[in-house]
Image: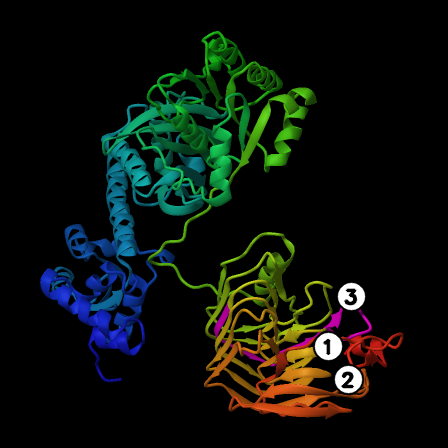
Amino acid sequence: MAYMRLGDLLVASGTITGQQLERALALQKETKQRLGDVLIQNGFITEAQLIDALRVQLGVDFVDLTAISIPVELAQYVPRNIAKKYCVVPVKLVRNSLYLAMSDPLDFVAQDEVKTASRKRIIPMIATRKAVEQAISRLYGNEGTARVIEEMKREAGSSSDVIPAQMAQDTADPQESAPTIRFVNALIERAYTERASDIHLEPQEGEMVVRMRIDGLLRRILTVPADLQNTVISRLKIMGGMNIAEHKIPQDGHAIQSVRGHSLDLRISSMPTVYGEKMVLRLLDKSAQALSKSQLGLEGQDLDNYNALLRNTSGVILLVGPTGSGKSTTMCNMIRDLSREEINIVTLEDPVEYHIPGVSQCQINEKTGMTFASGLRAILRQDPDIISVGEIRDGETASIAMRAAITGHLVFSTLHTNDAVSAVYRLKDVGVEPWLVASALRGVVSQRLLRKVCPHCKKGYQPSAEELALFAKEVTDDGKNYSGYTLNLTNDVDLGEYLWKPINGYKRLSGIVVNGNGHTIRSMKVRGCTNSSLYGAGFIGDINGAVTVKDIAFDGADVFFVNYAKPQFAGNVGGIVLGYTYGTTLFENVSVTNSSIWGFGKIGILLGMGADPGVKVTFKDCVSKNNTIHAAYDMGGLAGMIQRGNGVDNASVENCTVENITVDYYEECVDVQGKATLKENDKNGADVIKEVSGKYWVNGGYYWGGYADYYVSYGDSSYDAPVEGYSMRLANSEYCVNK
């Protein structure tokens, strides 16, 4: 491929328009920035789109720095100051070639600087800026820690050989060396920088592994030689006010550490294991700013429920969830939202995690007799308006909290249960009378913490056939309103032998978009009955409002269904893509090939029926080719029937292709008596009047079976159709159902 300028490449790929490029070039002249930065800042492209374009333009590879581990020895080839200045990080060394991850692979000055410093041949790779910055932090953080460990070894007079943990001294010198102090401080600082919630120091055979919990997942950071683990553990015990001579029982400690002007509350726990003591540090930023409601992840109905709970003036509000699910943070924000000068708020906490101005916060100390129960009794004598209890741990605390609530106080607390309903049973289990729960409980908030998707390094995920089918089941069965939802495909999906359940929402589902992004759904099979009121069938069954289906292909689909309300009949109204629509509908760049559909009437390849004469159905750049329809009436290569109101056509076909459509009138299932007159549209848009007698056959060139200016009634052998022209019955219903 010939070399193309970045702007021309983005225009050629359809990522930006020519007008957007001209605008960006004009801004570039003013700001002197790189074109890619200008395009991102103005919202014309994303960073991921820029990376894809640069990868094609320059022929460089993309590297996902979050998925690899960079050897710490590579830090010697690129000094920290150069890495930070140019936003580059070494990835690997192969012979004399150093692979360099760069946010801007066109920065040749940076490549020259690294080449001079490393004396290696530089091979650029592209990565997101944020990923490079995080990799720099990890790499050079480990480099510093590695140097400190070497200093600890030299000071301790140990060799570089690893000594098994069980051979290490049982006790360490309480007078810790300066390298040990620096190591622990660096470890805590790094945990703060990477927003870790916990630090795990885990003794194993031959080494001590250090892991940090970041975004809910434990990540291995580094290892400490086994002969140095006791020194590190002793330092942590001294910080936490723990007994350094005790190794046989668990201990708890507490420390305050200052990191970059922030005060960190450290909760330290030790646990004896077969290879030594395991230490876990929980980090709490005491100076952290309060989170807003949006930062908590509250939106929509959840936000409305949150605000409704805060309007209560009495009662108990419980926050439940497993350990580490953010209960205390949410409760703290509730207290902040309610804090006013005219209200007396008192809290009981263990420990006090966040300092709230204007709120009286009390620290639990069981050694002195300050428990949740005793503290709660004391608070009730302090004329409180709102009470916050860190955790309900026993029946006494629960009963006092409930009785305080029914006497006019608003009480907040947390409870360890897996869901909101279990909170009621948990209160009963600890001895709270059911009448008291019913009188005092105002609401229960159950929550979990979820990892957020990075907007810069996120990748499209292709659902499996089972996952795609689960989405359809959820939309159809769970009662939620999915209106306005967009279903995106990122790759082809082969449903194989999986039976597809049509996406049905009826009055609960409107305004959805199915965007295939140019991908194909293969081998979709629909089997079974349709609901008496939701009798459309296809990939989407029944839509109450507007729907858009675009840039998607269906190949090898096979749809067969029966009418649940009248099981003697084959299913009425169906299409491969969409069965029934009541709203404005757009099919754009939709292809259906090598597929078949079985139904009774109003059967089309793309659409079964457009049922509302007040809206328009548009087919644009669509293809229906090599397909078969098994039905009795109103059949078409694009649509079975589209209603029109007051004689006004409300269907449009633009640049569509309908080829080789076979309509198989199956007399083994349906008998037709008499004759009828149908109005059809051919591919040139002209009305064609066809008189149908006996078997009804639709020419494959027709787009749809007809406009509905009338209603066709049908019955079984017990009665005749009230409308002259049609009388239909099943001769072999069992055969039809199992077809």
Q: Which quadrant: the C terminus?
A: bottom right
The residue carrying mark 2 is: 725
For label 3, the SS is loop
Q: Is residue 337 above or below residue 59?
A: above
* Dot placed on the residue nearer the N-terminal end, 1 or 2: 1
Mark number, residue 712: 1
315 in relation to 572, above or below: above
- Is 373 one of the magenta-colored residues? no
Q: Distance from label 3 to label 1 (Cα)?
A: 17 Å
Q: Residue 327, percent across and down?
A: 48, 33
Q: Earlier in the sequence, mark 3 or mark 1?
A: 3
**Which image quarter holds the N terminus?**
bottom left
Residue 642: mark in rendering: none
Task: Please provide percent x and percent y for residue 684.
Answer: 51, 91
Depth check, front residue: 334 or 399: 334
Residue type, label 3: Ala
Q: Return the x and y of residue 301 as percentages of the image width and height.
A: 51, 43
Q: Is residue 409 left or right of residue 599?
A: left
Identity of the residue drawn at 38% across and 16% down: 342
Spatial separation of the CA atoms under disc 1 and disc 2: 9 Å
Residue 121 appears anywhere in the view: no
Q: Nearer the viewer, residue 473 or 165?
A: 473
Q: Residue at x 43, y 16 (%)?
A: 346
| Secondary structure under the numbered disc 1 in the rendered image | loop
Amino acid, disc 2? Gly
Task: Check if mark 3's residue and mark 1's residue have beta carbons within 8 Å.
Answer: no
Answer whether labels 1 and 2 touch (C-beta < 8 Å). yes
- The range drawn in magenta is 548-571
Q: Write down the residue under mark 3.
A: 565
Instruction: Please say if 144 is above or below 127.
Output: above
Q: Amino acid at mark 1?
A: Val
Confirm or deny contact between disc 3 and disc 2 (CB under 8 A).
no
